[in-house]
Image (spheres, rainbow, N blue to C red):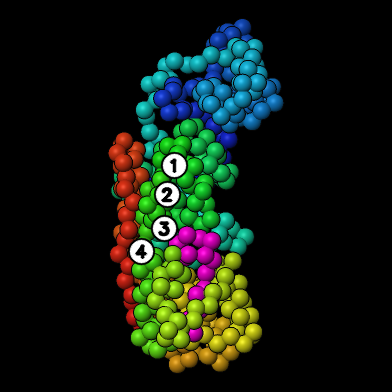
Amino acid sequence: MKSISRVSSNALLQACHTTAGSLTVFLMSDDLSKTPERGARASRPTMQDIARLANVSMPTVSRVLNDSPLVTEETRARVLDVAREQGYVVNRNAQKLRQARTGTVAVMLDFASHRHGAIGDPFIFELLAGVSEALSIRDQELLLSPPGLDDARAFEDFYRARGADGFIILGQGTRDAMLRTMAQRNVPMVVWGAVGKDAGYCAVGSDNIRGGRLAGRYFRERARRRWLFLGDIRHEELRLRYEGLCQEADPAEGITVDFLPIVSMAFTATAQTVSSYLVSGARPDAVFAFSDTAAMAAVGAFREHGLTAPRDYSLVGYNDIPPAAHFTPALTTINQKTDVAGALLVEKLMQQLDGARARSTLLPTEMVIRET
């Protein structure tokens, strides 16, 4: 990997802009009278100058200059009037760059799903390491979570401005609607998360329903009857795991499934949520956690109430992170083959950049039985 950096999308927007099927646009002045003296570098007003004079944002200037349909006619006329007044013209030589790549891929972490933007789950960094290695092999630069990309339009603007050739998004979170919009606008991207047939975008992820069913079968084999799922089912991945767990719960056998929302994925917050649940008097004899980190937090909370696994309850985590095998007690968990995930995510994105259609991939999902 050449470099990992955070950059300003505004700075990139000032540099160059493209849209599908249009020319790369550079702003330049043809008014030679603005040159202060012969031999001196010509003064070239920036895109920021046009935005300021037209009282619009720089992304709006970009859309106007690239003939985007997302701009109203009134705004388009105002920006073009300012551009003409300043003597701006389109640099036709920039057409040569139309098909050029930047050699940069933006890798987006799902900070919004983590308290105060802090990601403490080792699983995410395992994925990131795999993506970084795969990009390095292809001599691609990795741009880590550039700021300001909060909605589909911001992602599209960043892409059209050639800030990056495409995006690898590690975690859908609650952004499925935004991702579908990005796909409709032909923004190249691959998502780590739930694989949906009707999503419209390429995703790589595990068989989450199967993962839930494996956990349920494990509990049934151990004659557990009061099951608890830990996780925020607003996330599609976690909803599918919960659904798979419920599919294995047969009321005729006296099995019940309770659900405890974990809004913050932070370790301490998860432990506090589980502890409060136990204070209420609940006593599940089986726990399926959305991640190994959450499972570890649950073990601590149960221990504070005098409950240990596997004596008092069975426990299944998810992800099979390296510490899971060395934790006390060692975690039973679901492995989703993250060792190949990074390479697959990069390969799928490169297929799109080469003009091919990248298909979503469902990775094998396996139970790893340990002490809990």
Residue that label 2 marks: 199
Q: CA distance from mark 2 to mark 4?
A: 15 Å
Q: Image point 39% across, 66% down: which residue?
A: 209
> Which segment is the magenta one?
225-239
Q: CA distance from mark 3 to mark 1?
A: 15 Å
Residue that label 3 marks: 194
Q: Earlier in the sequence, mark 1 or mark 4?
A: 1
Q: Earlier in the sequence, mark 3 or mark 1?
A: 1
Q: Secondary structure at mark 3?
A: loop
Q: Secondary structure at mark 4?
A: loop
Vertically, is 303 above or below 42? below
Q: CA distance from mark 1 to mark 2?
A: 9 Å
Q: Is there a contact, CB below 8 Å, between mark 3 and mark 4?
A: no
Q: Residues within 10 Å of mark 4 (few under 14, many from 20)?
A: many
Q: Is there a contact, CB below 8 Å, between mark 2 and mark 4?
A: no
Residue that label 1 marks: 183
Vertically, is 26 above or below 110? above
Q: Earlier in the sequence, mark 2 or mark 3?
A: 3
Q: Residues within 10 Å of mark 3 (few under 14, many from 20)?
A: many
Q: CA distance from mark 1 to mark 4?
A: 22 Å
Give the residue type that dot 2 points to: Ala
Give the residue type that dot 4 points to: Asp
**Residue 56 falls in image quadrant:** top right
Instruction: Pick whichever, 156 or 233, lies toward us.
Output: 233
Give the residue type that dot 3 points to: Ala
Residue that label 4 marks: 207
Q: CA distance from mark 3 to mark 4?
A: 8 Å
Where's residue 127, x and y in %? 40, 59
Q: Earlier in the sequence, mark 3 or mark 4?
A: 3
Q: Image point 64% across, 14% down: which residue?
A: 81
Instruction: Pick whichever, 130 or 265, lies toward us.
Output: 265
Mark drawn on residue 88: none
